[in-house]
Amino acid sequence: MKHLGFSGEEILETINMVRTEKLDIRTVTVGISLFDCVAGDGATLCDNIYDKVTRIGRDLTRVSAEIAREFGIPIVNNRIAVTPVSLIAGRCDAAALTRVAETLDRAAHALGVDFIGGFSAHVEKGMTRIDAGLIEALPTALAATKRVCASVNVGSTRAGLNMDAIAAMGRTVKAIAAATAAQDSIGCAKLVVFCNAVEDNPFMAGAFHGASEADCVVNVGVSGPGVVLRAIEEAGDVDFGALTAVIRRTAFKITRAGELVGRAASARLGIPFGIVDLSLAPTPAERDSVARILEAIGLDGVGTHGSTAALALLNDAVKKGGAMASSYVGGLSGAFIPLSEDAGMIEAAARGTITIDKLEAMTSVCSVGLDMIAIPGDTPAETLSAIMADEAAIGMINRKTTAVRVIPVAGKGVGDWVDFGGLLGRAPIIPVHTMSSRRFVARGGRIPSPLQALIN
């Protein structure tokens, strides 16, 4: 039996992974270009955006449900990513940009999708008037919408770090936390601050449809921490070479499952297939955890010495296995370590073995960065900016994507807990350093690009 180039044996193996190891497709994300929506006034721009997004995305949830039933593979989320709004809303001020965000939210609601990403700006080398307006609009826009996700790229290996933008983002995150204080500052969970952002990432909150992409495309984000965990447990006490081979083979199988779903969705939607993003994205379910994988590799608890090395092994093996399975592996493709979304990470944070410093060290070898970390609500804006600068510096020097999604929970401090619900999970508020970074952030300007940028 063949289905879109996949053998019957592969399909049966995939079904077994779903049934016994909790494999799921975390997201089917349709990317949509908004360049042809540009208009001379905000009202027409919003009308054009709503019409195009609802037209191209109209069959997404129906097709995903059909594929999930037919293949027996759960599809957890349906999402849409659009062109960074700052690129198509040049005549809008902050108030008009908020109306654009509300239009995106209304379109997502009409389509029944879980999230829509792309309320975004790229300011790694400088900031235009529209970029500044979008950043100014973020607190109101994220408080006024439910499904809209935002991102700001503040650095890159080629450009260096825009410290003026990073300073602005520290103040912005504080403002978002205050604007959504009644919901435990959940607005901050819908914003990612990037260095070296990628154009084909299907995962929220950082998804956007890059300027180099086609008019529309289907990207799939596939997850499988439980599958990898079981494979490592079954392998037993083998050496690292053999263990890496086990993870590579498992990642190969997971990626094939993702491409099966992606190509089926592409054919049925009539939208070109883009990439499979093989990112081990955990959930609060006990065994659906990257932390438990690291512990299965040999750590008594994640956060102890050896955690960074174990994560490096895992991330590299996942990428190698995925790259062998598909010609179109993209996005981020590795291992996520979001604190509030991983049962093992939540446990480690509660007992104090995971700190923000250890998380920062681990981000040097994982897929993204400091993700879904709840910190005290009275954290100064300059401290938030300095955290962003540290993480962006890791990305800039290492030529990798890094990101910060921290949540200064209004009215809460160290020892308190926050519960965001669903995939966003729950977490203890963990401490940050209290010595000030104000003078550092206040210097402004741009941290120059490193020598690694000179590649021509």
Image (cartoon, helix red, strand yellow):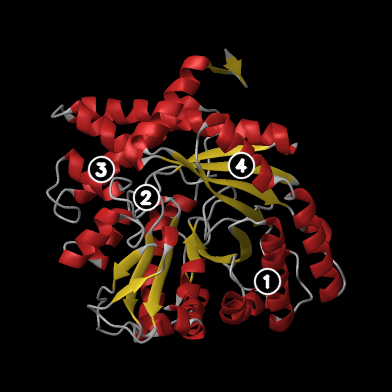
The amino acid beneath tag 1 is Ala
User: How far apart are the two marked residues, 4 and 3, measured between alpha carbons?
Assistant: 30 Å
Q: Are marks 4 and 2 in contact (CB under 8 Å)?
A: no
**Residue occupying the far top of the picture:** 1
Q: Quick one: quadrant of the N terminus?
A: top right
Q: What residue sits right under mark 1 in the picture?
A: 101
Q: Which mark is residue 65?
A: 4
- Mark 1 or 4, nearer chain start: 4
Q: Which mark is residue 293?
A: 3
The amino acid beneath tag 3 is Ile
User: How far apart are the two marked residues, 1 and 4, measured between alpha carbons?
Assistant: 27 Å
Q: Classify 359 as above or below 63.
A: below
Quarter of the image where one finds residue 250: top left
User: How far apart are the two marked residues, 2 and 3, measured between alpha carbons?
Assistant: 11 Å
Between 125 and 364, the one lying in front of the other is: 364
The residue that appears at 63% across and 80% down in the rendered structure is 137
Q: Which mark is residue 137?
A: none
Between 226 and 153, the one lying in front of the other is: 226
Q: Classify 64 as above or below 362.
A: above
The amino acid beneath tag 2 is Pro
Mark 3, Cα crowd under 10 Å, few <14 / some 14-19 / many 20+, is many
SS at mark 2? loop
The amino acid beneath tag 4 is Ala
Mark 4, Cα crowd under 10 Å, few <14 / some 14-19 / many 20+, is some
Q: Quick one: quadrant of the C terminus?
A: top right
SS at mark 3? helix
